[in-house]
Amino acid sequence: MYRTHTCGELRAANIGQSVTLAGWVQTVRKFGSITFVDLRDRYGLTQLLFGEELNKELADNPLGREFVLQVKGEVSERTAKNPQLATGDIELKVVSFKILNKSATPPFTIQDDTDGGDDLRMKYRYLDLRRQAVKKNLELRYAVNRAARNYLHENNFMDLETPFLIKSTPEGARDFVVPSRMNPGQFYALPQSPQTFKQLLMVSGYDRYYQIVKCFRDEDLRADRQPEFTQIDCEMSFVEQEDILTMFEGMVRHIFKAVKNIDYTEKIQRMTWEEAMWQYGNDKPDIRFGMKILNLKSAFTIGGEKPANGGLINGAGFGVFDDAETVLAICAPGCSEYTRKQTDELTEWVKRPQIGMKGLVYIKYNTDGSLKSSVDKFYSEEKLKAIAEAAGARKGDLILLLAGKEERTRKATSELRLEMGKRLGFRKDNEFKLLWVLDFPLFEYAEEENRWVARHHPFTSPKPSDIEVMIRNNPVIEDADKYLEHPYNHIKANAYDMVLNGNEIGGGSIRIFQRELQEKMFAALGMSQEESLHKFGFLLGAFEYGAPPHGGIAFGFDRLCSILGGSESIRDFIAFPKNNSGRDVMLDAPSTIDDKQLTELSIQLNVKGENA
């Protein structure tokens, strides 16, 4: 037996017991004739005491960091207790030890305050995984996994596996493709999601399905993206939108309680996609704080009526506003005392390429009621006060304004709002706020291609009230400049996203389940009947055999874990992640394959014009 207890198990109640431990040496500290060693395993850390009688043996067999060690001894009370350590009341007086394996000097310190950079730790990920901070992340990931499974099991969902080698049907991100040796010149694709399979399971009568499943997308990466990622993928039959929302509100509440011991009892707010875009500038707003966006220029609102403040900034001779497509403002509470240096720094921040604005206008609503602005010479104090009041500002607040093209300005204002929320301490890692965003557009218009594309995916159903609009109208756009007037531009999807702290953690929809409507959807996306049959004939055929109404949702499992763990990167919660270039630097993958494999696969490479 290598061990009788783990390194995180022993307590004061074990004092006097003879035990055997095994683990990795974290530190060695010599004090004259005695030596202290911290021994670590997955479960924790125990201090070992090597007395004078073992010193000669230690001299002959010195211990180093990350040596694998087995020790036998007696549990005793520590003289200097460590309240920060679960085993801090005891230590093990070693009577014998055995070095099970030696270790080379690690390339970085295996502690929370490691001296290893990202690239180095990724290369030696198997060492990085020994660190307590990384272990806690993976423990949280497992806890989320277990909580989700328990909830879904209790609600009669079945965990059903679906294939990884499927047919390529690219409708968004690029597919990863896999050549078939037995079918030369033909390829499988790795699934971007199990979407069509879970719909087929609904047709098959398995009315509650789930998987915690790997998905694959060949897309550019960032902190919250990986080429392979994990979803909590779910589907239900004989349901409407409200059934889905209720079921998965319950799942998220259950995860919060099981993983974070948080009773999330408050009602989860709902807003339409239009409200989210209008008030927050994006479709996944962080509602932990206010600072909503005010449109000072536009002649329309969500309801189509002119705002009462529509003429506030027009005709003042300030071309930046007068000539702009839109002028948007946010009100930063308590920031009127910002210095010139601080406002200049904000101006430089919005000029960054990621934001893309040419400048920033500010209005200070001082605590004494006076107003100071970077555009004083164009607007009277009376006008500035009217703008400030329209923005909902109070004395002591700072109004920040951006102007330009509608789409870019709205996106930039949204980013500025989030940045100010972060600077002002409104975006706390230990505060969680859930939101449903509903009623997305079913289609987006792709100007370059002069066609409609699906905002979610081509299996999303229109709102019931819009189904006839879709079936009755031709999707062809005769005049590209008039796409806003086309009936398809106003069709709403029976779709929903769950948002947590400004991050989309789940998205889904009620699906199309009638062949006629699905064929109409494919046609709207520019697919010919031949193409739709080639790509999705199996699904269309299935709809001929009594397909039930159904819908579902998929949660970004990695992202949910990272938010609950207080991290901005999902890589911190994946055991073996890829870097920002999609490479596994530990395995050095992707890599070339030899000519024999290429020949077996009937593949001839052409890289940068060179045949290989």
Image (cartoon, helix red, strand yellow):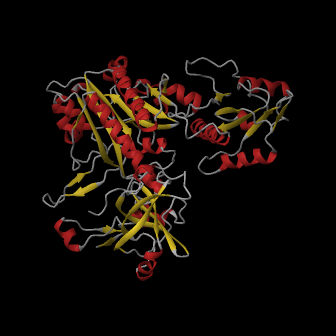
Q: Nearer the viewer, residue 105 or 7?
A: 7
**How far across and down, in percent of the image, does residue 427 sit?**
60, 38
**Residue ranking furthest to the front:** 16
Which residue is at a point 40% across and 74% down the rendered structure image? 103
**How far across and down, in percent of the image, does residue 564 sit?**
47, 41
The answer to whether 525 is drawn above or below residue 436 in the figure is below
Which residue is at a point 29% across and 21% down the rendered structure image? 239
The answer to whether 113 is drawn above or below residue 286 in the figure is below
Please say whether residue 485 is visible from this viewpoint.
yes
Q: On the picture, is 178 further left or further right than 392?
A: left
Q: On the picture, is 314 further left or further right than 17?
A: right
Please say whether residue 528 is visible from this viewpoint.
no
Q: On the picture, is 444 further left or further right than 100?
A: right
**Residue ranking furthest to the bottom:** 60
The answer to whether 445 is drawn above or below residue 601 in the figure is above
Image quadrant in which the N terminus is located:
bottom left
Which residue is at a point 54% across and 59% down the rendered structure image? 79
Residue 412, image quadrant: top right
Image quadrant in which the C terminus is located:
bottom left
**How far across and down, in percent of the image, does residue 382 sit?**
84, 24
The answer to whether 206 is drawn above or below residue 173 in the figure is above
